[in-house]
Amino acid sequence: MKRIYLDYAAATPLDKKVKKAMEPFWARKFANAGAIHAEGEEAKKAIENARSSAASVLGSKSGEVFFTSGATESNNLALFGIARHFKKGHIITSEIEHPSVLEPCMALEKEGFKITYLKVGADGIVDPEDVKKSLRPDTILASIVYANNKIGTIQPIREIGQIIKDYRLKTKNYGLFFHTDACQASNYLNLKIESLGVDLLTLNASKIYGPKGVGVLFKKTGVKISPQILGGGHEQGLRSGTPSTPLIVGLAEALVLTQKMKNYESKRLSELRDYFIQQVLKEIPGSKLNGHSKKRLPNNANFSFLQKEAESIIIKLDMMSVASSSGSACESQHQKDEKEERYSVRFSLGRHTNKKELNKVIEVLKKIVK
């Protein structure tokens, strides 16, 4: 049986157009963008063009786009950067953030920062009112994921952004900022900064059919953060290290292509997702959908199967040529739901997923669960 890949939330294949855009910069146009000779200027121009492309997608200024090694570094830079600039204060996050947000928060707790971990409802959604109630005079940052990486729930980022903006104006606390990890959302949802109301935003290429090992941190002009990697002062002194021209070019190309395909793919995958969910719930007794039925990413379907352990199901699916994944909605060590962790199976669809494949997966899944 031909293998069926349903783990696009973990990694996507490299788009052919992205690969083509990157190719000249591996060997032929290999120079260091920091050099002042013609070859170096050529690499620098490619990086600045990529920066402009990313800024255009975000609706930001080019100087507000900073390239990193990926989402983990971008999230760490946002959290540690803000915290270490202010040296003390209060941070708000949720219990369903990616570990690259939760782990820095826990590390900052040990340094004396106060952290509020917001709970979510049974549908996996952060209540904006909970954010509002948690704001206090010493709050310096709120970091809420745009879309959860496990159950795909879409968070009310715009509403939260407005709450933070209103609080900032009311209290004149201009040292309060809002960050979102938008990696899972970037294929399907609005990324315009002004619309979302965020001050910092994380993206990476590996979720949008681009290369692994490169990401973006959008930082609004006027937001002060401390660099976490020191050296030659690259990226306006915010992130030192020789920039990887091919990876940066690939990220920008992938981001532009993703925006062009966003509406079509969102509609197509939403229909496939709904069909898949409906059939699984209908065909497999005891199956349960995890997360909100509608406020979820177009490509995400996460199930529990009546006390059947996820790891066993995933291994057997793999043996039957189906790639899937696992994990709970809550990865926080503060409230680790071991039951969810053990019984949650994630199927994430992508550009190459079709109905024929999903029908095969349903038949295989039925046998495995039974």
Image: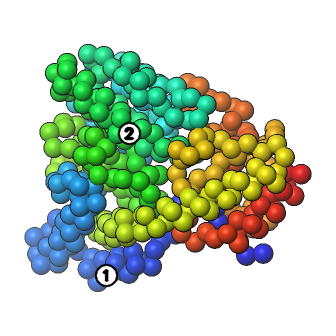
Q: Which mark is residue 101?
A: none
Using the rendered view, name the quadrant where residue 68 is placed: bottom left
* Left or right: where 350 falls relative to 212: right
Q: Along the horizontal axis of the image, is 271 left or right of 369?
A: left
Picture quadrant of residue 27: bottom left
User: Residue at horizontal 75%, vertical 56%?
Assistant: 279
Under mark 1, the amino acid is: Pro
Instruction: Give the class, few, some or many, for how many residues have Cα within 10 Å of label 2's Cα (few <14, many ≥20).
Output: many
Tell me the residue that label 1 is attached to: 24
Please, is residue 126 above or below residue 310 in the view?
Answer: above
| In the depicted structure, whether residue 269 falls above or below residue 232 | below
Pick the quarter of the image with the N terminus.
bottom right
Q: Which image quadrant for residue 169?
A: top left
The residue that appears at 67% across and 59% down in the rendered structure is: 275
> Marks 2/1: CA distance?
38 Å
What secondary structure is marked by label 1? helix
Label 2 element class: helix
Q: On residue 157, which mark appears?
A: 2
Image coordinates for residue 78, horizontal then vertical, percent: 31, 39
Amino acid type, residue under disc 2 in the picture: Ile
What residue do we see at 27% from left, 76% from top? 30
Closer to the chain start, of discs 2 and 1, is 1
Q: Residue at x 31, y 44 (%)?
A: 196
